[in-house]
Image (spheres, rainbow, N blue to C red):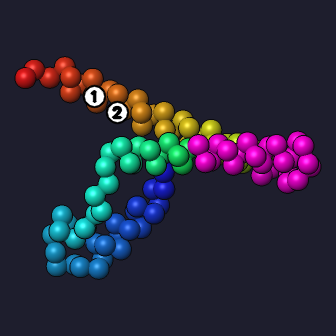
Amino acid sequence: MNVSLATSSLAAASQATPGLAPASRLAAPQISFADALGSAVNQVESVQSTAQSAAMDLLANGKGDVHSVALASQRAELSLELFQQVRNKLVQAYQEIMKMPM
């Protein structure tokens, strides 16, 4: 969930063509919702596996240090918590839409 990359891309696009309207400035690639969600899940899994391998290397082989393992563990925990919050908001939005009268 790389927010800085999206922010920098948005800033670069807005500076590249100052005379155009905001909607026409950004030619965003068409990514499906399923692809975006799958990418987010894969990224969370990747961060967690990195933290797990760092911990296993430290415990089994003595490679690395405690600080890097703690940072990797915190990074994995925060990415999972962020993903859970996004999921909760999506479920909440879906439930609100389903309550709307047709």
Give the amino acid type for the residue marked by disc 2 in the picture. Leu
Q: Nearer the viewer, residue 99 or 40?
A: 40
> Cβ–Cβ below 8 Å for labels 1 and 2?
yes
Q: How far is mark 1 from mark 2, CA to CA?
A: 6 Å
- Position of the C terminus, as image quadrant, is top left
**On residue 41, which mark appears?**
none
What segment is highlighted magenta in the picture? 45-68
Q: Position of residue 33 (x, y in %)?
A: 32, 45
Residue sitting nearer the eye, 44 or 65: 44
Q: What secondary structure is found at the residue carrying circle 2?
A: helix
Q: Is residue 71 magenta?
A: no
> What secondary structure predominates along the stretch shown in magenta?
helix
Disc 1, SS = helix
Q: Residues within 10 Å of mark 1 (few under 14, many from 20)?
A: few
Residue found at x 35% / y 69%: 11
In magenta stretch: residue 54: yes
Q: Position of residue 16 (x, y in %)?
A: 29, 79
Compare residues 69 and 14 and report the one nearer the observer: 69
User: Amino acid under label 1?
Assistant: Tyr
User: Up-down: is 97 above or below 32?
Assistant: above
Which numbered marker is on residue 90? 2
State the residue at coordinates (36%, 32%): 89
Looking at the image, residue 73 sits to the left or right of residue 35; the answer is right
The residue pinned by badge 1 equals 94
Q: Position of residue 67 (x, y in %)?
A: 80, 50
In the drawing, does residue 46 fall left or right of residue 56?
left
